[in-house]
């Protein structure tokens, strides 16, 4: 008699064997072929991913609003073609972003995916979508997306993380500053942002006294502000990812009385609307280098700001503007291709888009699918109705992701990191 | 056979049948979700091994899985081939599990929980810091599944089969003398020591064995996403694994699978339709605790036992 | 490092530690008395803080904002304990899962109502000046937080060890049956403690809104710190929470200054060291 325990094991083993055999047998027969990229005559279906919940929920919500606003203003059409969007939430997590991209491509059969925003989610999504042969449009800043990791199916409607900071470095030197301290978060976005400032500042002849790297999500910046103060530089560059980090940094900065003592220059995403809403008047006269200035004296910008404010009761942030730009470029490309979205052809058409003015200004694309456009030196001012916004002090036109170096010379260097900081 | 046994066999057959039939009747996206359920269930199963048998709740096991996944990712990115991917993953899984085991073998309860929490976050932090190896925050792209299982449905069967094998392994461990030792430790550590068992040695082995299953989950994870980033080691991933175990029924064999199904359904499927999916998940957890305090499978088992006692 | 810098970092550490104490004290008291690991504690902190911010925006009065935040968190605590937690008293894992569910619902509710933007309380003008300490200026608000936490700590200690209420509570912890047979309504005492713990979390939230920002995920971030503090100090011990939060705050500040690459894991170092020599924490009672 087989003891009970042994009998149980025998049965379990038998069941499992049967199951495995079934599975192996089944895996020999392929199910129906999955289809991708459907779309009825005269309509295109697009997918849009952004983090609407999670720690960057504010960015994702703004992105959705910006994208939707473009289609609203254009009757949901690009030329003769009707445009349908399916929205997904990636919560700021690459695993979720990837699964949602799968859903968009395989279940919703979209023809193109736009977004998300965080670099790791963008890399995951772009890798998957391009792998399926579909085009994708991104607004994340990750430098390498249009440099060493270039893919003909990926277009960035936006600037690399380092791009808008090159003019900052040069300008700082021209202002007479000879020594600088940089404060950036200790991850790729921070390395690339600081890298842009540092390489231009050092090339011009400046010296970097100290580079302060802080962990993302730092709650308490007093240490880092103290370090910056101790180095006693002519200027401090803050390359913030925005949101709570920027606000908390500035709280520490003003709290330690440095506001009127050391000149501070911010990157694209430091003194954005999210920051201004929270910080208020303390932020007046802050200078930044950015590609989105909501106070820019341009009809395109002001119409957008007015319409957005009417609908959402707040001035649009750079995330709303960025998503609007993505929609606009997609629409222009659709007009060029007559409503067809066919892989790299669509991206090529998008790359030909050239705008004399837009939310970002006069822009074109370079041959690695990145924007070449103006960078603005902005200052925070009070609008007539009392709200704060950034207005343009100086324009640096046609800034390329490769700055003044040219693609080959630029790519000889590795991507900005803790090891290669641009010095 | 009694009615109860017929019911069990029928349920088992239906389950296996469903699993095998899925790619033929369900859309590819849903099947990819099922693949994710199996992978999550495997990780939850590794947590369940420690929590269900030995009463040791680890809230850092995603760290072990992620470390293994990074092993695969690194080897893949350097084009070292399948054997290297598995070899590196196995080595890393063993090394990381040993670290977990050494630091926790003398602890229990809340202290065990906190140390595993710290270890999980440490793995997360290392994944961020060692960016030349791990790609840092941006992660690693360019991982490819093994050729033979690269298509979505083949990979699904592969994952399901792997899960089935691991499930058998977990069952074997649970019913073995080793499993009894773990249960003994949960009852009373002092009694076990007085019986001559080395409690620390048993705990050490348990964590390493549990780590092996977590490592398997990690390998599948890397191949599934063909992408790897530190968030796979995050505290919330480890916490969700624990939630899956408790919701499904701590100590039950199929509990982790049920728990994984619920959490994956909420996080990936429900979230496409309902923006407040996290509230829904929270309410589901609350309801499960109130009406099935031993978890869903635990509750079903209780019901089954009630029925089998009827004359 | 010059003395000024040392003092600066020490104050930074103590002010963050003070905030942690406000949060950890409630957590450790609830555990000590009721053996509940309340993972919704961070959510009470979050909702209290958000309500505090909203109240401040409306009423422009810091004290009113604090009261509103504390009251809100207390209400959520009351609802959680009376309606939900009471039904699973004594079962550890179900209790933990229940608090996780509550935390999810509250946190998502906050996201739905207050949105994803990081929010904070502009420091009340009377406290926004900086004070001259030796050779440098230091934000007054941070000193206020330290003072507040000290005051709360002293109050808790006095209540616990010098009042009848404290004796009642300690009795209920030591021997529930005897206490009940002596006419003490232990369930009501426990509810009151849980509500009080939640209220402390709410206070921490409003105070934090002046120091940091609140946004989705802030509840988990701070809860992790609180867990470390409580494990280092010893579960259930008020002195432990005080010493632990000061220690963790200081380690956090100095590690960010000296070894920023490791600041991520730095707070686990004291935890590891303490647990190696005293597994139940610095002031904890060992439970076999």
Image: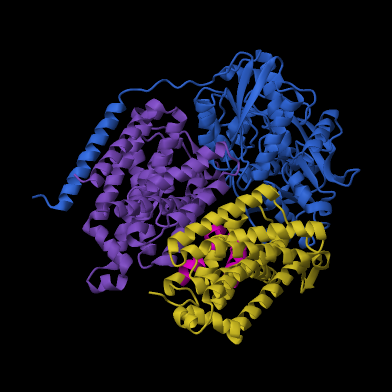
Chain colours: A blue, B purple, C yellow
Image position of C62 with respect to A51: above or below = below
User: Foreground: A158 or A172?
Assistant: A158
In this image, B87 relative to B26: left or right? left
Q: Which residues are magenta?
A: C246-274
Using the rendered image of the protein, determine whether residue B136 is visible from the camera's viewpoint: yes
Name the residue rendered at 76%, 44% in the picture.
Answer: A273
Name the residue rendered at 74%, 71% in the picture.
Answer: C144
Give percent across and percent down for residue C212.
Answer: 69, 59
In this image, A158 relative to C122: left or right? left
In this image, C48 relative to A294: left or right? left
User: Foreground: C154 or A152?
Assistant: C154
Membership of B295 in magenta stretch: no
Membership of C258 in magenta stretch: yes
State the residue lying farthest toward the right: A384
Using the rendered image of the protein, determine whether residue A127 is visible from the camera's viewpoint: no
Image position of B15 with respect to C115: above or below = above
Give percent across and percent down for residue A125.
Answer: 54, 33
State the residue lying farthest toward the left: A1
Give percent across and percent down for residue A263.
Answer: 80, 52
Report the quarter where the N terminus of chain B lies. Answer: top left
Image position of A160 with respect to C13: above or below = above
User: Foreground: B165 or B128?
Assistant: B165
Q: Main secondary structure of the magenta part?
A: helix
Give percent across and percent down for residue A311.
Answer: 78, 36
Q: How many marks?
A: 0
User: Foreground: A187 or C79?
Assistant: C79
């Amino acid at each position: 008699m087989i003891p009970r325990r042994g009998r149980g094991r025998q049965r379990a083993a038998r069941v499992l064997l049967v199951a495995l055999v079934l599975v192996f047998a089944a895996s020999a027969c392929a199910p129906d072929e999955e289809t991708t990229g459907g779309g009825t005559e005269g309509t295109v279906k697009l997918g849009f991913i952004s983090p609407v919940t999670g720690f960057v929920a504010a960015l994702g919500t703004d992105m959705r609003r910006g994208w939707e606003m473009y289609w609203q203003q254009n009757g949901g059409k690009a030329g003769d073609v009707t445009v349908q969007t399916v929205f997904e939430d990636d919560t700021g997590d690459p695993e979720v972003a990837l699964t949602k991209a799968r859903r968009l491509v395989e279940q919703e059969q979209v023809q193109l995916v736009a977004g998300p925003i965080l670099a790791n989610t963008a890399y995951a999504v772009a890798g998957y979508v391009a792998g399926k042969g579909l085009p994708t449009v991104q607004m994340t800043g990750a430098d390498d997306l249009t440099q060493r990791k270039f893919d003909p199916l990926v277009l960035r409607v936006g600037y690399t993380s380092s791009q808008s900071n090159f003019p900052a470095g040069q300008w700082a030197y021209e202002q007479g500053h000879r020594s600088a301290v940089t404060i950036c978060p200790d991850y790729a976005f921070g390395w690339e942002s600081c890298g842009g400032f540092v390489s231009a500042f050092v090339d011009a002849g400046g010296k970097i006294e100290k580079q302060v790297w802080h962990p993302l999500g730092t709650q308490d910046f007093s240490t880092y502000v103290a370090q910056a103060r101790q180095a006693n530089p002519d200027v401090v560059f803050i390359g913030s990812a925005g949101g709570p980090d920027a606000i908390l940094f500035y709280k520490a900065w003003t709290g330690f009385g440095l506001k009127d003592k050391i000149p501070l220059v911010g990157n694209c995403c430091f003194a954005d609307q999210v920051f201004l809403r929270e910080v208020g008047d303390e932020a007046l006269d802050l200078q930044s280098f950015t590609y989105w200035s909501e106070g820019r004296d341009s009809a395109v910008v002001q119409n957008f700001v007015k319409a957005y404010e009417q609908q959402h009761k707040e001035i649009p942030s750079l995330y709303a503007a960025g998503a609007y730009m993505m929609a606009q470029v997609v629409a222009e490309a659709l007009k060029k291709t007559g409503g067809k979205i066919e892989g790299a052809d669509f991206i090529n058409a998008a790359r030909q888009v050239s705008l004399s003015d837009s939310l970002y200004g006069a822009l074109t694309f370079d041959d690695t699918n990145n924007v070449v456009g103006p960078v603005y030196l902005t200052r925070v001012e009070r609008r007539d109705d009392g709200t704060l916004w950034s207005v343009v002090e100086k324009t640096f036109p046609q800034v390329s992701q490769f700055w003044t170096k040219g693609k080959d010379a630029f790519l000889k260097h590795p991507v900005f990191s803790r090891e290669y900081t641009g010095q | 056979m009694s009615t109860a046994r017929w019911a069990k066999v029928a349920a088992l057959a239906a389950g296996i049948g469903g699993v095998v039939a899925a790619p033929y009747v369900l859309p590819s996206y849903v099947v990819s979700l099922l693949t994710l359920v199996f992978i999550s269930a495997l990780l939850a199963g590794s947590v369940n091994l420690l929590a269900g048998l030995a009463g040791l709740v680890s809230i850092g096991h995603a760290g072990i899985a992620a470390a293994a996944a990074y092993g695969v990712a690194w080897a893949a990115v350097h084009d070292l081939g399948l054997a290297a991917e598995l070899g590196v993953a196995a080595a890393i899984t063993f090394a990381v599990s040993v670290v977990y085991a050494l630091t926790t073998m003398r602890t229990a309860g809340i202290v065990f929980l906190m140390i595993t929490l710290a270890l999980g976050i440490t793995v997360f932090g290392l994944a961020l810091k060692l960016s030349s190896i791990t790609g840092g925050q941006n992660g690693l792209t360019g991982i490819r599944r093994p050729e033979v299982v690269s298509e979505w449905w083949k990979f699904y069967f592969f994952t399901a089969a792997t899960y089935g094998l691991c499930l058998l392994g977990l069952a074997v461990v649970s019913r073995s003398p080793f499993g009894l030792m773990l249960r003994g430790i949960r009852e009373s550590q002092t009694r076990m020591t007085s019986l001559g068992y080395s409690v620390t040695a048993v705990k050490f082995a348990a964590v390493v064995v549990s780590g092996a299953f977590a490592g398997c989950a990690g390998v599948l994870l890397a191949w599934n996403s063909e992408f790897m980033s530190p968030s796979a080691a995050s505290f919330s991933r480890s916490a969700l694994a624990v939630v899956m175990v408790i919701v499904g029924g701590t100590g039950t064999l199929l509990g982790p699978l049920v728990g994984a199904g619920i959490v994956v359904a909420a996080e990936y499927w429900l979230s496409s339709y309902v923006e407040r999916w996290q509230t829904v998940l929270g309410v589901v957890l609350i309801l499960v605790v109130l009406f099935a305090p031993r978890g869903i499978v635990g509750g079903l088992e209780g019901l089954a036992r009630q029925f089998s006692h009827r004359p | 490092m010059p003395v000024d810098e040392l003092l600066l970092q020490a104050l930074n550490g103590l002010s963050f530690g003070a905030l942690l104490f406000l949060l950890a004290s409630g957590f450790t008291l609830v555990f000590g008395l009721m053996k509940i690991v309340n993972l919704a504690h961070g959510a009470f902190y979050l909702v209290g803080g958000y309500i505090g911010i909203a109240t401040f925006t409306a009423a422009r009065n810091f004290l009113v904002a604090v009261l509103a935040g504390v009251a809100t968190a207390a209400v959520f605590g009351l609802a959680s304990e009376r309606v939900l937690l009471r039904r699973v008293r004594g079962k550890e894992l179900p209790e933990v899962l229940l608090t996780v569910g509550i935390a999810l619902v509250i946190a998502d509710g906050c996201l739905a109502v207050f949105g994803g933007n990081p929010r904070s309380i502009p420091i009340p003008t009377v406290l926004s000046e900086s004070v001259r300490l030796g050779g440098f200026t230091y934000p007054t608000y941070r000193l206020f937080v330290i003072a507040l936490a000290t005051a709360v700590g002293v109050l808790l200690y006095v209540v616990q060890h010098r009042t009848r209420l404290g004796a009642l509570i300690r009795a209920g912890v030591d021997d529930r049956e005897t206490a009940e047979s002596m006419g003490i309504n232990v369930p009501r005492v426990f509810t009151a403690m849980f509500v009080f713990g939640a209220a402390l979390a709410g206070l921490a939230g409003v105070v934090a809104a002046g120091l940091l920002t609140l946004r989705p995920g802030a509840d988990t971030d701070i809860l992790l710190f609180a867990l470390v503090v409580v494990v280092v100090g010893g579960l259930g011990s008020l002195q432990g929470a005080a010493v632990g939060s000061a220690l963790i705050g200081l380690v956090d500040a100095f590690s960010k200054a000296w070894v920023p690459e490791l600041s991520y894991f730095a707070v686990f170092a004291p935890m590891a060291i303490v647990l190696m020599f005293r597994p139940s924490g610095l002031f904890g009672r060992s439970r076999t």
